[in-house]
Image (spheres, rainbow, N blue to C red):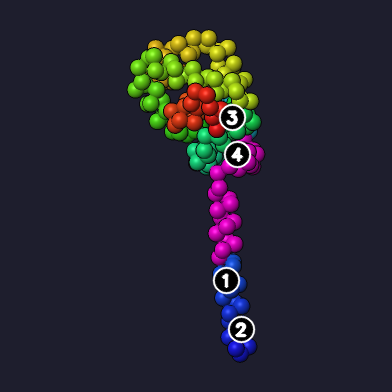
Amino acid sequence: MNKGTLLRGIAVLGIVWAVVWGVMAWSGNKKATPEKVTELIEDAEFEDWSGEDPASFLSERRKARLEKLNELGDVMNRLDLRQQEQVEENGDAMSLFLRLNPEEQSHFVGLIVEKRSAAFMNALDEMKPEERKQTIDRAMKALTRGSNKGALDQLIAKNPQVIDEIVNKGMKSFYQDASAEMKMELAPFLNAVGKVVQGFEQPGREGL
């Protein structure tokens, strides 16, 4: 093999490895993990706009914040149930939620609660009240076994009748009447319902 051919081979190999490294780096940046969620929230550096009138801020700033929320929502919706549970347990998403203004809160809830939980809410509503109650009881037991038990306690403390209302009215009906904050607080419960509906929480099993 002459020197020119060897150099060309090395150059081609270098290009191939550069492409492979680029794909790996891109995939790493796009990978959905709880750590990625925390990173996005920290990097976004959301100012506290809670209680503020959105009209008091420049449209460019409002648009930029919504774009960051959309990016965050895309990553969170690609997490599996266990990863979603980890995000809920570390409290980063709720901490961010409390810094948003009412318009942003509704947008964020639509992105990360309604979108990923719609199928679970439909599944609950298609059940008869007795079956729905059994499913909800199993979801509550799943929550009490995990480190996210505080989410259930907080939910019931704010509305002691929440479970009965969901059983009797249906999940979607209750959800539609709830405030944005209540919807956000329902996220751990809906995640637990998802584990039951998908068969990860069977009687006698410890779940995921």
Is residue 58 visible in the rendered image? The answer is no
Q: Is residue 147 magenta?
A: no
> How far is disc 3 from disc 2 in space, using C-alphas?
55 Å
Secondary structure under the numbered disc 4 in the rendered image:
helix
| Cα distance between the residues tagged 2 and 1 | 14 Å
Counting residues from the N terminus, which is met first, the one under dot 2 or under dot 1? 2
Residue 187 at what x, y percent from top left? 52, 26
- Residue at screen point 57% across, 57% down: 24
The answer to the question of whether label 4 and label 1 lie on touching residues, with beta carbons closer than 8 A, is: no
Q: Which residues are magenta?
A: 19-46
Residue corresponding to mark 4: 34
Res 160 visible: yes
Tell me the quarter of the image containing the C terminus: top right
| Residue in the image at 53% along x and 9% along y | 160
Residue 17 lies left or right of residue 167; in this view the side is right
Percent across and percent down for residue 54 are 53, 29
First along the sequence among labels 4 and 3: 4
- Mark 4 → mark 1, Cα distance in angstroms: 33 Å
Amino acid type shown at disc 1: Ile
Residue at the disc numbered 3: 88
Which residue has dot 1 on it? 15
Residue at numbered disc 2: 6
**Which sits in the foreground, 193 or 172?**
193
